[in-house]
Amino acid sequence: MLFLGHLGIGYKLSAPFNKGLNLWWLFLGMLLPDLIDKPLYYAVLLLSGRGHTGIISCTHVFGHTGLLLLFLVALAFVFRSKPLAAVVLGMVTHLLIDNLYEHFFYPGASSSFLALVFPLKGWRFADMPFESPREHLASAAFNPYVVAGEIAGAFLLLWDFVIKKKLERKRRLRHH
């Protein structure tokens, strides 16, 4: 899943729990694993000049781990931080979406799960077949599940932030 899928679907998944949380922090959490891991993988790939670069072997590494999630949960709890709680909730939706997506559409794939349980299944992550961000994006652009997720995410965002607001505004005007 890419940008809009994580935001739109993640927002819907978090709705029962996100009352009183700042949406910008929530949205940051929904993107945080990819904001950490994708640049990390491609920077290591660029600097090394080769694929599969040791422990940084795919775009689901440290940012997609349960360890990072638990660390952020502990920080949010210790500091009683609503912004960190929002980031944690957003990150939970990201990891859930990635793991469900992989489970249902790519059974047997392990990049999301290996990252989530790292290092319980060993000190490695999955191997990434992509040699460049362009190749990765091209693959996603022609993947019907990714495209469907992006369309669904865009629709959910549009519905919640545009259409729903217009309907609420009309309803308020009728009652005044």
Image: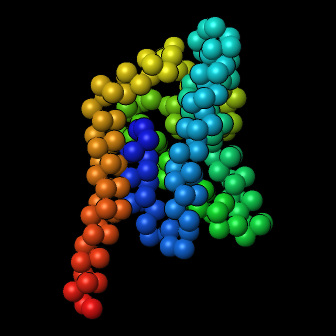
User: Could you tell me which quadrant the C terminus lies in?
Assistant: bottom left
Can residue 165 be seen?
yes
Question: Residue 82 appears in which quarter of the rendering?
Answer: bottom right
Residue depicted at 69% across the width and 46% down the height: 67
User: Could you tell me which quadrant the N terminus lies in?
Assistant: top left
Residue depicted at 37% across the width and 21% down the height: 138
Residue 12 in the image, given as x and y percentages of width and height: 39, 60
Residue in the foreground of this view, choosing between 108 and 32: 32
Residue 69 in the image, given as x and y percentages of width and height: 65, 51
Residue depicted at 50% across the width and 69% down the height: 17
Q: Determine the residue located farthest toward the bottom in the rendered image.
A: 176
Q: Position of 159 compared to 80: left or right?
A: left
Q: Position of 20 compared to 169: left or right?
A: right
Question: Residue 158 appears in which quarter of the rendering?
Answer: bottom left
Residue in the foreground of this view, choosing between 81 and 64: 81
Residue 129 in the image, given as x and y percentages of width and height: 48, 17
Q: Is residue 132 shown above or below 110?
A: above
Residue depicted at 30% across the width and 25% down the height: 142
Q: Position of 89 compared to 49: left or right?
A: left
